[in-house]
Image: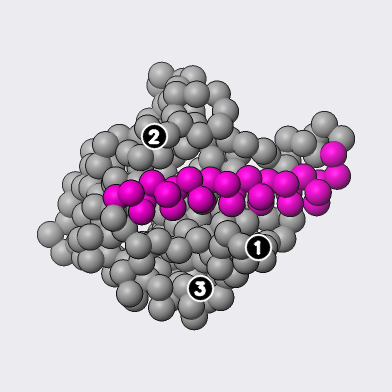
Amino acid sequence: MNTTNDSYVAPRRALLKVSGEALMGPGQFGVDAQTVDRIASDIATVSRSGVEVCLVVGGGNIFRGLTAAARGMDRAQGDYAGMLATVINALMVQNALEREGVPTRVMSAIHMSSIAEPYIRRRAVRHMEKGRVVIFAAGTGNPFFTTDTAAALRAAEMDCDLLLKGTQVDGVYTADPRKDKTATRYDSLTYLEVLSRDLNVMDAAAISLARENRLPIVVFNIHEDGAFERVIRGEGNFTRIEEAG
């Protein structure tokens, strides 16, 4: 069980990575409206607390380029299709946040000016300084890069103090706890431990990018009510990944 350190300081600016799978809720594909509304409510609470919030959304609930490539589709084309799926998810999350009364902007790495702003770093920073939640869509805009890598990249570009990954379980485990009942959760790890133990947290490019920029990563269960708010305060169950010492 993680405990809050008395010297803990809440982040000034944080990026939340929301996977496409998280938006499915109990379903097998697509977007579950109730789940999106609950996640949006949690994000709204954190935003109103004064923390500047931005998000990267995945698209695996709609289309996954790597899976399509395994079935014979050109990998680059599959990845571009996956990027478009993230835009759909970003618009769904934007709609839910605005119904919570939170001003929101979607910024896409692929230009589609009718529905989203083009990604411009300084403009994104200005949006957050004005209290708007910024949702980054279309990954990095390049094939062969995951949305985990996009999350680490955007968090570094936005000068975030913390990168949070909302998953299906409350942290990083020695094995998949949904399949292995003996699996135990790590309270903390170093970047090198994640890489050397081949832990299925984020891809190696994302972990390396976070390490180079000394960007702490927190992995938590996004399906628990209020979990995002709790981990921002350093409370609840989670795994924190950062440099040793």
Q: Which residue is mark 3?
A: 157
Name the element at disc 3.
helix
Number of marks in picture:
3
> Percent from the top left, x then y, of residue 8?
20, 62
26 left or right of 6?
Answer: right
185 left or right of 236?
Answer: right
- The three-letter amino acid code for the residue at tag 2 is Thr
Name the element at disc 2.
helix
Considering only order in the chain, which callout, 3 or 1, is on the residue closer to the N terminus? 1
Considering only order in the chain, which callout, 2 or 1, is on the residue closer to the N terminus? 2
Name the element at disc 1.
loop
- The three-letter amino acid code for the residue at tag 3 is Glu
Asked whether 86 or 100 is in front, the reply is 100
Q: Which residue is mark 2?
A: 35
Residue at (53, 45) in percent of width and height = 89
The reply to whether residue 191 is in sight is no
> Percent from the top left, x then y, of residue 204?
61, 53
- Crowding at mark 2 (Cα within 10 Å: few <14, some 14-19, many 20+): some
Q: Quadrant of residue 214?
A: bottom left
Q: Which residues are magenta?
A: 73-100
Q: Nearer the viewer, mark 1 or mark 2?
A: 1
Q: Which residue is mark 1?
A: 112
- Crowding at mark 1 (Cα within 10 Å: few <14, some 14-19, many 20+): few
- The prevailing secondary structure element of the residues shown in magenta is helix
Residue at (25, 42) in percent of width and height = 226
Say above or below: 29 vs 89: above
Any magenta on residue 78?
yes
